[in-house]
């Protein structure tokens, strides 16, 4: 087998100890360090929300942190300014502070005891309203409300959907005999444990509706692909054939999985219905074929193969047939992951002995190396296509890193309790 480092590192036995979602401990939360920002950040002021003080502080802090973490916004000092969505902004004052945009809001009590969050976004230079919204929420959902408000502000100011309300899945190695599959908010908070194992957990993959995770379990002394419902904690077997069953990847409609099976000898790519029926073989070459990923239009499956003598990226139609080579630059390119719009492909390439995140413009075939690290693996696009989440190493310990598709914005996500691996970014909330 050719040495695909991101694949070999995932091999291990899985012993499931829990399938229900359990609240994660505080020390298991991801902490995020911003290590790079965009060149032209939008100056925006987020006034302290009015109304119920404790709830308002939570929402305000989440909105500010989300926008600042994105690397696209410069936060303007709002000290000494008290206003809500009902206030008339002093546009000249905010212009003098350097703000191009201003948001203000409040948190109130609804008639039924629930909370109401309201906000407005203003264009300071044009002295007008850009938008706003109102949400019925509750104390446990205040952070989620802040993420939703930040999403709206982000989209109004950039023209792209915000990703603050999305989630990330990742694996934490808490000790030599404890591995946990976590699901957290995009800012690393509100981490929950979906799976606990005495051995490594591998290859989590989100369904397009965000309600299921596919993963590989070795609990029966062989690798088996399961589909796990996050709402119920129940799971079904999607692939349990003779030999190895691995590397699940969802089709865009959520009906099928691309998987790697060795039931006919060697590692070949198949598709299978999410309930385990309807197995179809896609690749026939005697070489190793692995790490499948559907194109967003569902017409192709991209994958890694050594059929040309070294690991490279290919694609094959969902009906099978001849495979086409996609990567040509360099002698080692693995783990293809397509952007949501299908225009770019993230992958791991070996450069000067290091494994680095790269991205290819599929139309021009131009490749850009986005990182200067040494052991990148498991790339996963954000659902708006702007960021790519990867696993890498720092100080010999596994951490996650998020990099913008142009390489300018960089974040590092880590957990003090252990190694972090196997990231997967969720789709937009349905």
Image (tube, rainbow, N blue to C red):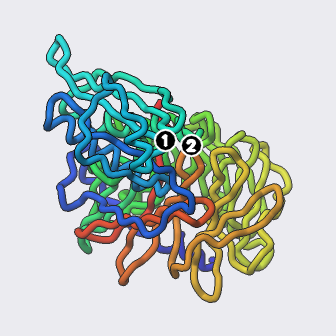
Question: Which residue is at the front of the view, 71 or 400?
Answer: 71
Residue 316 lies, in percent from the top left, at 78, 53
Residue 401 lies, in percent from the top left, at 45, 66
Q: Residues within 10 Å of mark 1 (few under 14, many from 20)?
A: many
Question: Which residue is at the front of the view, 48 or 170?
Answer: 48
Residue at the top extreme, as displayed: 111
- Left or right: 416 with respect to 99? left
- Residue identified by numbered label 1: 154
Q: What secondary structure is found at the residue carrying circle 1?
A: helix
Using the rendered view, name the quadrant where residue 109 is placed.
Answer: top left
- Left or right: 254 with respect to 197? right
Above or below residue 184? Residue 35 is: below
Q: Tell me the residue at 33%/54% (across/down).
A: 188
Spatial distance from mark 2 to mark 1, Cα to Cα? 6 Å
Above or below residue 403? Residue 426 is: above
Q: What secondary structure is found at the residue carrying circle 2?
A: helix
- Counting labels gives 2
- Left or right: 416 with respect to 229? left
Q: Tell me the residue at 39%/49% (across/down).
A: 97
- Residue identified by numbered label 2: 158
From where the camera sits, is residue 262 visible? Answer: no
Q: Tell me the residue at 64%/43% (across/down).
A: 279
Residue 20 lies, in percent from the top left, at 26, 42
Contact, mark 2 vs mark 1 (Cβ under 8 Å): yes
Question: Which residue is at the front of the view, 111 or 128?
Answer: 128
């Amino acid at each position: 087998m050719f040495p695909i480092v991101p694949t070999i590192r995932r091999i291990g036995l899985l012993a499931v100890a829990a399938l229900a979602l359990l609240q994660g401990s505080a020390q298991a939360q991801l902490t995020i360090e911003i290590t790079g920002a965009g060149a032209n950040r939008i100056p925006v002021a987020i006034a302290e929300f009015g109304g119920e003080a404790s709830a308002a502080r939570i929402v305000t802090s989440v909105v500010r942190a989300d926008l600042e973490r994105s690397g696209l916004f410069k936060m303007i000092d709002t000290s000494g300014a008290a206003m809500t969505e009902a206030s008339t902004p002093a546009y000249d004052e905010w212009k003098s502070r350097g703000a191009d945009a201003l948001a203000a809001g409040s948190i109130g009590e609804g008639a039924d005891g629930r909370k109401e969050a309201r906000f407005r976004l203003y264009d300071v230079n044009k002295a007008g309203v850009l938008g706003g919204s109102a949400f019925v929420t509750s104390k446990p959902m205040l952070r989620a409300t802040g993420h939703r408000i930040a999403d709206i502000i982000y989209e109004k100011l950039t023209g792209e959907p915000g990703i603050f309300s999305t989630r990330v899945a990742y694996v934490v190695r808490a000790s030599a005999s404890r591995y946990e599959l976590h699901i957290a908010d995009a800012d690393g908070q509100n981490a929950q444990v979906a799976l606990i194992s005495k051995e490594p957990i591998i290859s989590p993959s989100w369904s397009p509706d965000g309600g299921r995770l596919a993963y590989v379990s070795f609990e029966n002394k062989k690798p088996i692909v399961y589909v796990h419902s996050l709402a119920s904690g129940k799971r079904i077997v999607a692939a349990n054939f003779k030999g190895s069953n691995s590397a699940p990847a969802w089709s865009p409609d959520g009906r099928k999985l691309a998987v790697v099976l060795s039931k006919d000898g060697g590692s070949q790519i198949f598709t299978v219905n999410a309930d385990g029926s309807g197995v179809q073989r896609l690749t026939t070459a005697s070489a190793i074929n692995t790490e499948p990923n559907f194109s967003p239009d569902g017409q192709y499956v991209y994958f890694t193969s050594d059929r040309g003598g070294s690991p490279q990226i290919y694609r094959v139609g969902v009906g099978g047939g001849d495979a086409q080579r996609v990567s040509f630059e360099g002698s080692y390119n693995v783990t293809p992951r397509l952007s949501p719009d299908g225009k770019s492909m993230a992958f791991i390439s070996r450069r000067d002995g290091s494994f680095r995140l790269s991205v290819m413009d599929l139309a021009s075939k131009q490749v850009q190396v986005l990182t200067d690290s040494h052991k990148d693996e498991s790339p996963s696009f954000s659902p708006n296509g702007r960021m790519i989440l990867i696993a890498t190493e720092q100080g010999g310990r596994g951490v996650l890193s998020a990099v913008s598709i142009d390489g300018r914005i960089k974040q590092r996500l880590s957990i003090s309790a252990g190694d972090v691996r196997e990231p997967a970014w969720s789709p937009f909330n349905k």
